[in-house]
Image: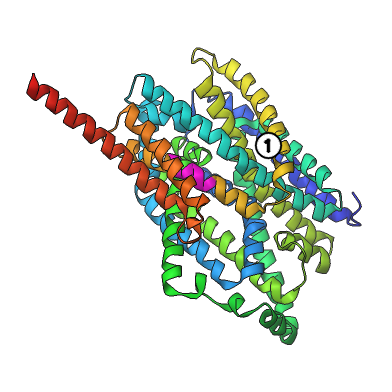
Amino acid sequence: MNLSSFGVEIIFVATLAITFTAAFLGRKHSQKNSSGLTKQNLNKWLIGLSAGATANSGFIVTGAVGLGYTFGFQWLFLPISWFLGDLVFWKFCPNRINALGQKTGITTLSELLKVGLSGRYAKIASILAAILIVVCLGGYTSAQWIAGQKFVSGAFDVSPITSLMFFACVIVAYTSIGGFRGSIYADSVQAIIRIIGTFLALIAVIYFALEDQSSFITNWESAGDDFLSWLPGNTIGSAIFFVLGYAFAAIGFGLGQPQLVSRYLAGSSPEETKSAQWIYISFVQLTWISMTLFGVILRGVMPDISDPEAGLSVFFRSYFGNILTGIIVADIFSTIAATSNSLLVAMSQAIVHDFFPSHFSNRHKSKLSIIVVLLLGLFTMILALFLSKDNTVFTIALSSISLLASGLAAPVLIKIFGLPSTGFSLLMSISLGLISSIVWKVTEMDLVLNETVIGIVVGFSANWLVVNLARKRLEQVNDNG
């Protein structure tokens, strides 16, 4: 490492040590609780902090900063829109997910879709959901590797490929050690580091903005009129569609992301799970709004950053000494690592539990999950090398999230609310929700309204139509009989 900052390296190594310790503790406790997610008995703090850290992702310290830096105040509407969707989601969903898990003992989101159903179509729907999870989360994980690449390359002045491989290998290593419980412990510790880093970054950039206000204002004005505009699209109509689209995306994110659903399943009770609401929402909103605002202010302090998504590390390396820079390095690592680790665990759970025989013992599944994590790490690293050439962390992450939500949000809602469904109706809900959102995106209608809205509406409609057609056909048969 070529950075002349021994203190930075010490803090980073200390962060790694804390992370691996949390993973080891998680592995130790998992051996005492090997009977599935419902036996994990997570309290509201572990649920809220681990889910919040998982939801944050590398997007918060790269994409959110880059959006604020490049486009200005209007991108503060993104976390505000997400907040509205999260309010709806937490009002109705996490406690119901936990209650269903307590009743059935399910481990994965795919298993949730099969509850109360049997037959060929139910099995196909579950397998399709598992495939969709692995594919979309694979893309989402690659986005985290790219964010990690930007972080390591910027912090330690090493090549992009070396940075990506180093970051990914570290995450794969402690994921293999800790498993699900290790992921929960590590995420919770990393959430605390993220809160410290958030306050430090925002206070620091405001200080430099106030120190030379005339240059700061000049730099802001040179960014263009749109930069200082508050409304997405500069019109009320565009802003309404923006808020509506991303509010639906937030609901779909909560329902369609297995790395989050697993945390709700692992709560000690429906009541304890629901009580994590404001821990989760407060953490997500604090970090997201702060990092977007950091990017907006940074544009006035450092107007010529070539890669705005690397703005957080560039700012601290340029203006601060080893200790403060080291804290931010630990913060960025923790933020990206929390999501990457959880994604690998979620994909591993989907593959081990949904594609391998149910008669495998917990011991065999535990060993198999380690092999799967290693293979997934390798695959997503290779994918990241190709995706990083022409895409940002924001575009890759949002596309993966939206497609997964479009295919799975409606079926999950149908199951947790106990709405009428069949194996075939859920299969159609997943398929048509996904296809409609892809068509919507390909035709670039997502520039007007996020494709998740279309996927959820079509998914619900498909299930309702299939169930009612089957009911009418049965009534006709009975009448004729």
The location of residue 10, given as percent across then percent down, is 83, 49
Residue 20, position as x, y percentages in the image:
71, 37
* Left or right side of 146 for 230: left
Q: Is residue 250 above or below residue 384?
A: below
Comparing 165 with 456, the one in front is 456
Badge 1, how many Cα within 10 Å: few under 14, some, many 20+? many
Q: Secondary structure at mark 1?
A: helix
Of residues 168 and 430, the one drawn nearer to the viewer in this rendering: 430
Magenta portion: prevailing SS class: helix
- Residues rendered magenta in the picture: 401-407
Residue at 47% in and 32% down: 129
Disc 1 marks a residue whose amino acid type is Thr
Quadrant of the rendered image containing residue 461? top left
Query: Quick one: 162 or 19, which is closer to the camera?
Result: 162
Residue at figure coordinates x 73%, y 39% from the top left: 168
Determine whether, in the image, residue 177 is placed left or right of residue 238: right
Please name the residue that numbered disc 1 is placed on. Answer: 380
